[in-house]
Amino acid sequence: MDFSLILELFGLSIAAALIAGFVVPWIGSYLYLRRTSFYGLALPQLAATGVACGFAVMPWWVDHVGIGDLELAAALEDTHAAMNYHLGWASLFTMGGLAVMLLIGRRSGSEVAHVAGAFVIASACTVLFAHASPMGEIFVHELLRGEILAVGVHELETLAAVLGLSFIVLLWLQNDFILVSYDRETAQVLGKRVGAFEAGLALIVAASVAAGTMTVGPVVLFGLLVLPPIAARPFARSIPHFLWLASGFGLLGTALGIWASFQWDLPLGPCVVLACALSTLPGWIATLVRK
């Protein structure tokens, strides 16, 4: 296995996977603290639905709204314009779906059931929207399979910008986000703007999931949001330590998945997820030993 050749051909895809492997588990840790890790299942699927919808309505959109004054064929081939266009649809579906799930779940008291329902509905809509566009069907199929070896410069720049900004904001306001996520009542007593921080966290989650799904796919996003926090929890001595450990496990799992993918010529996305799953074994063993 010639790593120099691999880096030359797939360096951008590897860089995108490693960036997601470090930042996404940090975001997933807040979902874990809020006991809403199951959102990590529905949100990437909602983002994929948005991408598929974007392909389905693209002919109409080009004719009536326009994508940078491009014709349909040019818009499909222009990765810069297409990335911005589909990122908008992915963000719209992710943020809209998150808002609806939060609103309905809190009012009905059965948040888990509604998230599961959102996942099923989004999965069905993804297939139907993709079926309406031959180009979209191919793209979404590769996205769902975890084929993430065609990342371009613009895709990497977009992912790095969104995840980088999200990480900086979460690190800058870490204490406030931790308090609001872990103990909402205490945060209210202390006079924190709980609603603003929750809305900010929801925006960060939605934007990161949308950009990540467009680049590394929903399967990888789901795995990175959920598995590294599970792996980190048994070893965490404090919540900040938990956040850093989750990112460390995510980065390690991503690196091992990349190695396995090229070593055995397997799809990169599933390899990353399974490597992250293996990283939960030490914590599971440690928990059994402590008992």
Image (spheres, helix red, strand yellow):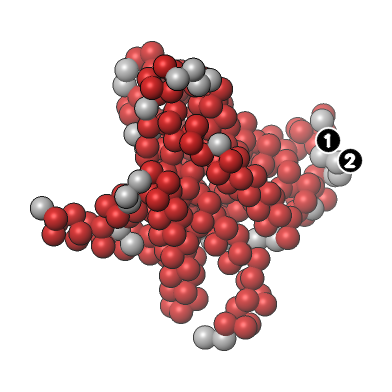
What amino acid type should be assigned to the residue bearing mark 2?
Asp
Q: Residue at x 32, y 51 (%)?
A: 236
Residue 210 seen: no
Return the residue nearer the eye: 268 or 187: 187
Q: Percent position (x, y) of residue 241?
A: 40, 50
Q: Is the residue marked by circle 2 packed among few (<14), some (14-19), or many (20+) residues within 10 Å?
A: few
Q: Percent position (x, y) of residue 67?
A: 82, 39
Q: Mark 1 highlights which residue?
A: 66
> In screen coordinates, is 252 left or right of 152?
left
The reply to whether discs 1 and 2 touch (Cβ–Cβ < 8 Å) is: yes
Toward the front, the furthest residue is: 190
Q: Residue at x 55, y 36 (%)?
A: 173
Q: Percent position (x, y) of residue 191?
A: 49, 17
Q: Residue at x 75, y 32 (%)?
A: 60
Q: Residue at x 20, y 59 (%)?
A: 286
Toward the bottom, the furthest residue is: 2
Return the residue nearer the eye: 214 or 69: 214
The local secondary structure at tag 1 comes to loop
What amino acid type should be assigned to the residue bearing mark 1?
Gly
| Quadrant housing residue 51 | top right
Return the residue nearer the eye: 38 or 190: 190
Toward the top, the furthest residue is: 107
Q: Mark 2 highlights which residue?
A: 69
Q: Percent position (x, y) of residue 23?
A: 53, 51
Counting labels gives 2
The local secondary structure at tag 2 comes to loop
